[in-house]
Image (tube, grey):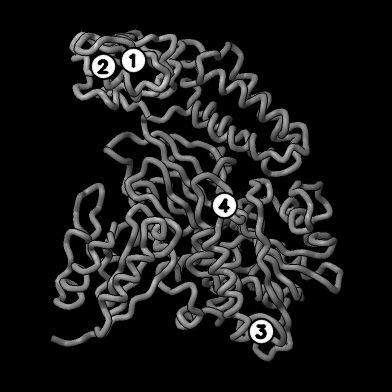
Amino acid sequence: MEDKKRTILICRGTGCESAKSPQIQAALEEKVQGLNVEVKFTGCHGMCQQGPIVVVEPEDIFYAHVKLRDVPKIVESHIKNDEVVERLVYEDPTTKEKIPTYHDIPFYKRQKRLVLRNCGQIDPENIDDALARDSYAGLGEALKMEPVEIVAEVKKSGLRGRGGGGFPTGLKWEFTQKAAGDVKYVLCNADEGDPGAFMDRSVLEGDPHAVLEGMIIAGFAISAKQGYIYCRAEYPLAIKRLQIAIEQAREHGYLGKDILGSGFDFDIEIFHGAGAFVCGEETALITSIEGNRGMPRNRPPYPANEGLYGKPTLLNNVKTYANIPLIITNGSGWFADIGTENSKGTAVFALTGKIANSGLIEVPMGVTLREIIYDIGGGILDSKEFKAVQTGGPSGGCLPESFLDTPVDYDSLIEAGSMMGSGGMVVMDEDTCMVDVARYFLDFTEKESCGKCVPCRIGTKQMLTILEDIVEGRGKPGDIDRLEELAHGIKIGSLCGLGQTAPNPVLTTIRYFRDEYEAHIYDNACPAKQCKEFISYHIVDSCIGCGLCRRNCPVDAITGEQKELHHIDQELCIQCGECYEVCPPKVFSIEIHTGEKSTEPEPVLQVVTG
């Protein structure tokens, strides 16, 4: 048998690491000793729910949900005998088809990975791996150019900020380049805090050199000598790999004094953020680095003129910087040919929720929501109906089925009432209560408000109180109008983007799902059958009296003697559903007020109680 060289790639992003991928790597390294095999770890492959992921090259075989006990089988069967381990091969959750080859999996096949080009392909702690895939080639090209030429290329590319606002990147660079001052700074916003978002974290964990290279090019373009990466302390793995990458870049002459013999000096440090969502706003982030409480300030002056320590400052997102080396290497025209007229390049999303294939994806701007959800995401779990998708994180909007053919770009999403944001995308199915979704996201933004301006501090609290009343059965006529009035006031009067966008989930759910609000308020009902206030559990006559429900009730709402019919005290019941979960014969009925005429008890088996 020909002893062909193989490489085994083990995903060690945060998700896979939590599922023991480091131990899997160690076991593989031990088992392949003496064989013509290289074992190395990578960052996130993107298909997080399939982890731990192991890919065998050059065959391109994709193994999912790998356990430590599977290592001997992979080595004996695949590595030694060229027999693919079928039971570990990826299975499409929709078609149930086994798809062994990595690049044939629809989740990957329909993507265009630019920012994620090296994630899942290189060892993020080995700069030689990055260099083998042309990392720092863009820097070498940039150092041969004049700073104004670099800025011109970025402007012509049409790249817009990937942090949420979508401001033209080249224009921001030009403002900072032209600003007066001998001292300037380059900042990277890695303070990713949206619920369910992990795009920036995965880039930093999987390809930190792409971000460093983009920042160094930016430093050369605006004549800065110092850069800072503001990364939240909850990302320890990202911080660890960033620090390793910075030290390796210094050793290879890409950071520090006289970079690549060009006479250009530039260095980067990591600043650990404390996890305040508001520090994703540029002036709050700058204030935090300066050692003060992270709170936004009025603009102008803008950071391009007066930023960190009062000096001209360029601040971009992780994904924005990761695009820069590609633009310099391939040219602005190449980048501008990707995407739409006003939204160039690709968009990176954390695709989560009630979706068959959740994870990290990258698609050209202009693809539709339908393509993302059904072609890449594989559709809705358990063959349920699609209900809504929220883009843009807690500041985004919830769009119904009629918007599935909306192109994913900055302008189209804003027109629909949502936004691109930093890249969160949450898919919801028929069992989702849209009023409760609005309450959930507003609860997040209300807690994350820094409290500096009254509209955000007080207004979001008032809106949240109204939403809590509605989902808990205390809604009143006029509540919807009050929510809309407060929302518009908060958007107009808030100081920063947190307050200005916080009402979006509420406004879009009222706009597209107003009937659900009205059902809660006027019919004392939750059409999605989710809000506990509108659900009551009842034990039917076929109860065998085993006592499991009584013993597991957290509030002692169930009474009954052994082998006799039990009863639930509706005054004490908190509708947690624990009694149904532990009941062996499932002898329960559930009464759910849905806004329909009939309120007859339904079998619990027909209802997802959440």
Q: Position of residue 507 (x, y in %)?
A: 58, 30
Q: Is 378 or 591 nearer to us in this picture?
A: 591
Q: Which residue is mark 1?
A: 537
Residue 215 vs residue 409: left or right?
A: right
Q: Position of residue 46 (x, y in %)?
A: 40, 59
> Three-letter amino acid code at disc 2?
Phe
Res. 195 visible in picture: yes
Q: Is 236 or 81 nearer to us in this picture?
A: 236
First of labels 4, 2 by sequence position: 4
Classed neighbour count for the residue bearing mark 4: other residues with Cα under 10 Å, few (<14), some (14–19), many (≥20): many
In this rendering, the label closer to the viewer, 3 or 2: 2
Residue 208 vs residue 457: left or right?
A: left
Q: CA distance from mark 2 to mark 1?
A: 7 Å
Q: Which residue is mark 2?
A: 588
On-image quarter of the C terminus: top left
> Three-letter amino acid code at disc 4?
Ser
